[in-house]
């Protein structure tokens, strides 16, 4: 469990865990996460795409396997607009969500690739079971002590513990010149 | 170039390349792709997320490196609703977009992970340069000969050639029982 908590924290550290400020939208769900008091925002699954990420690790996740995650970062309207305009720091009210899934694969999919494109050694993977979701919420006054950001992490709708949340801001320090956000906006193909 | 075309085709085969039916929205951009006559839909980058995928290959991509892509599948409103409701076949007008990026990484990001979570061997990657985008457009009458789907592939706004598009439907055959769409809807964490 301890390792799992650390890995979950790693998610926060790099994927841009985002927090939700209840006052910002008037809508939120469930229990508030510690330290920053953030709840899960409504309908964050409908937000627009910032980028796609992957996280791997040599350590065990509890089931004996190596860590392999696929991730999506989504933004509310303020966050997406700031990304597209290059506005830094992000405006108050911007929220970034990081959705994390276990990376999975399908024999059927890979057999189809092999049959369609022989000799290329193609292999596919995709977002499997849900792992956790994280939020970064911008409120330059409320969260002035942490670069204007509040952070939150939830697994199955339940917030992570205080020790986990206490790591968020320090791990985001290396991205200080990007307003503490690691993730860049993925270009439009 | 030939290898690149094959790899691009692989994208179509598995990622659920989606095509755009001009008549469906009245908005489209640039040159139509061969066979299915599909153009790039406006604002597809704003569509909602279906899932995240990754494609790897042993073969060269033209620059001597192995193939490594991160991908996002987005859907227009009809496609998202059908996914959420489990509606199969997809309704006419549903469009699925598959955005493909070269997988990239950052020393700064990985150093931050190592510093924040020592001993876990964590490594991160993210969507780098844009590669191509593909579309699947549902029109059960117009595309009756290909399972009701039209397919299209674009790189830098230019459609792929006819040979590439001729492979799309046959490669999607293994997913016939899922209305020829390989990608499942990623659960909400």
Image (cartoon, coloured by chain):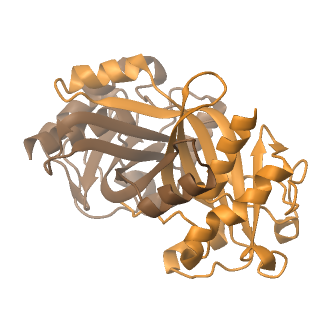
Chain colours: A brown, B orange
> Which residue is depicted at the point 16% across and 44% down?
A4
Name which quarter of the figure residue B69 lies in: top right
Name which quarter of the figure residue B96 lies in: bottom right
- Outermost residue, right side: B31
Residue A166 seen by the camera: yes
Coordinates of residue A140 in the picture (x, y in percent): 40, 32
Which quadrant is the N terminus of chain B positioned in? top right
Q: Is residue B88 left or right of residue A101?
A: right
Coordinates of residue B79 in the picture (x, y in percent): 62, 70
Coordinates of residue A128 in the picture (x, y in percent): 37, 58
In this orientation, which residue lies closer to the viewer: B23 or B12?
Answer: B12
In this orientation, which residue lies closer to the viewer: B180 or B24?
Answer: B180
Q: Is residue B1 left or right of residue B130?
A: right
> Which residue is depicted at the point 48% across and 50% down?
A124
In this orientation, which residue lies closer to the viewer: A21 or B102?
Answer: B102
In this orientation, which residue lies closer to the viewer: A34 or B144?
Answer: B144
Residue A138 seen by the camera: no
Which quadrant is the C terminus of chain B positioned in? bottom left
Q: Is residue A84 above or below residue B48?
A: above
> Which residue is depicted at the point 87% across and 61% down?
B35
């Amino acid at each position: 469990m301890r390792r799992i908590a650390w890995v979950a924290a790693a998610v926060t550290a790099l994927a841009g865990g985002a927090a939700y400020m209840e006052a910002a939208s008037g809508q939120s769900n469930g229990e508030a996460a510690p330290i920053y008091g953030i709840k899960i925002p409504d309908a964050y699954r409908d937000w627009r795409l910032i980028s796609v990420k992957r996280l791997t690790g040599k350590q065990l996740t509890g089931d004996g396997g190596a860590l392999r995650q696929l991730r999506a970062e989504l933004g509310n309207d303020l966050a997406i607009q700031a990304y597209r305009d290059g506005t830094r720091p992000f405006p108050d009210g911007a929220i970034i969500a990081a959705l994390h899934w276990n990376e999975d694969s399908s024999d059927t999919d890979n057999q189809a690739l092999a049959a369609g494109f022989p000799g290329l050694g193609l292999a596919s993977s995709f977002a499997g079971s849900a792992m956790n979701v994280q939020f970064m919420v911008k409120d330059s006054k409320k969260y002035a002590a942490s670069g204007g950001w509040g952070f939150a992490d939830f697994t199955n709708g339940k917030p992570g513990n205080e020790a986990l949340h206490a790591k968020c801001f320090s791990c985001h320090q290396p991205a200080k010149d990007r307003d503490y956000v690691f993730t860049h906006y993925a270009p439009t193909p």
